[in-house]
Image (tube, grey):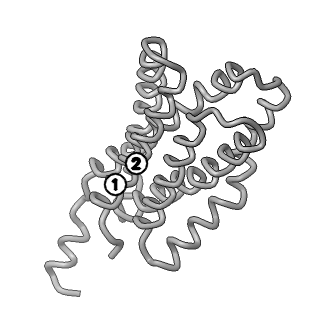
Amino acid sequence: MPAAAVAAAARPQSIVPSWIVYGFQFVAIGAWTAYAVVYFEAMGIDIAVIGVLAAVPAIVAILASPAWGLVADRLGDMRLPYLVAAIWAALAAVGLAMAPGMPWLAVAVLMLSVGAAGLTPLIDARTIQRLWPQRERFGQARVAGSFAFMAGTIGTGILVAASDLRTMFVVYAVAMTGAGIAAVALLGRPR
């Protein structure tokens, strides 16, 4: 390996690109996590059905997360699968904002869950790759997601109070799309 390549590999990578992607993604997650159940309740959905709808993302993630990872591994780059998954989730959120009745509501929740399932594992893996061999800096990169989750939850609440409950889906869709675009633009191909 040429000396310049060795020196470049030893130079610490910036955590700012991961901060930005985590920021967008976790604003969306904060909007969904805090207000989806409230939205379903406002639609008059039975509490038992709300429980099932709230469980769908965790159930779907069992299969969808590894599937998105497999696609990224086959391509050798997580950026395109991340973009597709983020836009997929954003479009499902737009569908949910239209307040579809059952069974379309369940289908939209399922579709949102399939799209969102792979995002965190993909960005986590790419962040660790980028920071290698200083992978112990992962927590410094990941903390942006925690702050964004808090800001997204509070900010969405303020917007919802000032407008309409469906505003949560606007926040979700815009933030997810931003995450996908930021991932493609900022994270680069693995070496």
Furthest-right residue in view?
Answer: 48
Is residue 116 shown left or right of residue 174?
A: right
Q: What residue appears at the point 22 percent right and 77 percent down from the top-left corner? A: 6
Instruction: Give the class, few, some or many, for how many residues have Cα within 10 Å of label 2's Cα (few <14, many ≥20).
Output: many
Check disc 2 and report its element: helix, strand or loop: helix
Q: Which residue is mark 1?
A: 181
Q: Which residue is mark 2?
A: 177
Q: What residue appears at the point 66 percent right and 60 percent down from the top-left corner? A: 64
- The residue lying toward the viewer, choosing from 103 and 181, is 103
Q: Quadrant of residue 155?
A: top left
Q: What residue appears at the point 50 percent right and 28 percent down from the top-left corner? A: 168
Q: Contact (CB < 8 A) between labels 2 and 1? A: yes
- The C terminus appears in which quarter of the rendering? bottom left
Residue 144 is situated, as x and y percent measured from the top left of the image, at: 38, 38
Is residue 40 shown left or right of residue 122?
A: right
- Distance between mark 2 and mark 1 Cα atoms: 6 Å
Q: Disc 2 marks which amino acid? A: Thr
Q: Quadrant of residue 51?
A: top right
Residue 132 is situated, as x and y percent measured from the top left of the image, at: 36, 64
Instruction: Judge whether 77 appears above or below 99 on screen.
Output: below
- The N terminus appears in which quarter of the rendering? bottom left
Can you tell which mark lies on residue 90?
none
Q: Disc 1 marks which amino acid? A: Ile
Q: What residue appears at the point 41 percent right and 30 percent down from the top-left corner? A: 147
Instruction: Give the class, few, some or many, for how many residues have Cα within 10 Å of label 1's Cα (few <14, many ≥20).
Output: many
